Amino acid sequence: MDRITIDAILALIKREVVPAMGCTEPAAVSLAVAKATELLGTIPEHIDLQLSGNIIKNAMGVGIPGTGMIGLPIAVALGALVGKSEYGLEVLKDVNDDWVEEGKKYIAKDRISICHKEDAPSNLYIEVEVRSAEGGKAKAIISGSHQNFVHLSRAEEVLLDTEAGESAGENNRDVKLTAAMVYDFAMTAPREDILFIMEAKRLNSAAADLGMSGKYGHSLGMTLLNSGGLIGVAPLDRMMARTSAACDARMGGAQIAVMSNSGSGNQGITATMPVVTYAEEISADEETTARALILSHLTSIYIKQSLGTLSALCGCVVASTGASAGLVYLMGGNYDQVCAAIKNMVANLTGMICDGAKPACSMKISSGVATAVMSAMLAMNCKCVTASEGIISDDIDVTINNLTSIGREAMRETDKHVLKIMVEGK
């Protein structure tokens, strides 16, 4: 692989694998509010938000870091009161108990208006307009990806205005991957170029350790390792437990950053923790662990390139598929066996719906981890779902496209119906 391609792929990974605090959808809303507030120059008297359905869906039931609260209103209030846009998706890292109390007061004054923008140009769309008591106003719009500002204005002065659509996201500038490119890069990129991925191990392992305290979400991670001997003794059990524990902490509102993937902290956790845990089980060295993590994360990024940032397909399907590829490498497998594992994953998990970010995501993630291990084991035993079975193709890239086309196109009505149930059907 030539140096130009290596640098392009490195740039892609470093854009898509970044620290994030809390669920990335409410974090992106806080980021847009913080930016609009900075442009306004004062705490807004009123904040109007127009959001795509997927943003609403992924922010309804998730804990907001450091607040003990769930949902958008507190994320919006704190974005205006204490958020700093320079922090990116860690926009609320300065939150403390005093600011939470101020946020509650802000909400109580009915200063926030949130509505569903049904004709949003992107599944990920956040439009924020803030107004001061003196009549000043400012606007910020994020579209396509979680930190992709497409419009900024103050009063009548337009500071930034680009096409507000999915195609305007940063993925348009990225190298277009194939499965072979992903594998080649992970195997051959210079060691010194890829060791940065070990920061994902550090951040996400810390989240797993915190989740094991049993203080967050449904405490699935702790439950799996304290099951009275039912499970908890095999490497698979530890892989499931540590991955779900990190999700417990993140979805439960722990004030801790995780390393995300393609705009999702849960995807970052799922692409990291099974690989890290198994690497520790076999005493893999640093370079081997780093290459496995690169293979896992870059496979996830590749799948998301054609799926899109948000969809009706649960992100754990994508990230656990990446993890399965990384596990095959750690087990001593080759490219054909990595492809087999991916096909096995697609044959099993395709169709798992996303019904919003919430504490119960840890259960879906644990299912993804279990399937990733099973798929890798089958691949290592030269077992692979064939082209005569379901949506699998002999061509690995076609197989991945079959998966993403279902999530991107066929599940659009599913996405709308899931949101309708969440908003109206309970």
Image (tube, rainbow, N blue to C red):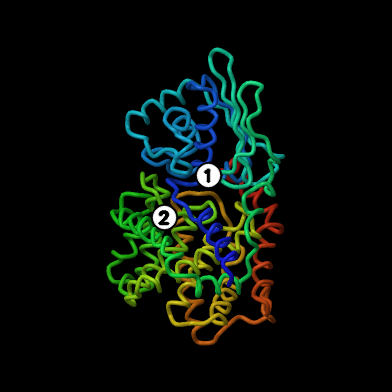
Whether residue 311 is visible, yes or no, is no
- On residue 25, the disc is 1
Whether residue 374 is visible, yes or no, is yes
Seen from the viewer's position, the closer of residues 215 and 78 is: 78
**Relative to 211, 128 lies left or right:** right
Of the residues shown, which amino acid type is indicated by label 1? Glu
Residue drawn where x is 37% and y is 35% of the image: 95
The secondary element bearing badge 2 is classed as helix
Of the residues shown, which amino acid type is indicated by label 2? Cys
Check if mark 2's residue and mark 1's residue have beta carbons within 8 Å: no
Task: Please name the residue that numbered disc 2 is placed on.
Answer: 247
Q: Residue furthest front?
A: 3
- On residue 95, the disc is none
Give the x, y percent position of residue 135: 58, 14
Residue drawn where x is 64% and y is 82% of the image: 386
**Relative to 332, 283 lies left or right:** left
Q: Is residue 90 above or below residue 2?
A: above
Q: Residues within 10 Å of mark 2 (few under 14, many from 20)?
A: many
Give the x, y percent position of residue 229: 28, 71
The secondary element bearing badge 1 is classed as helix
Give the x, y percent position of residue 84: 45, 34
Q: CA distance from mark 2 to mark 1?
A: 15 Å
Q: Is residue 285 above or below residue 63?
A: below
Q: Is residue 108 above or below residue 22?
A: above
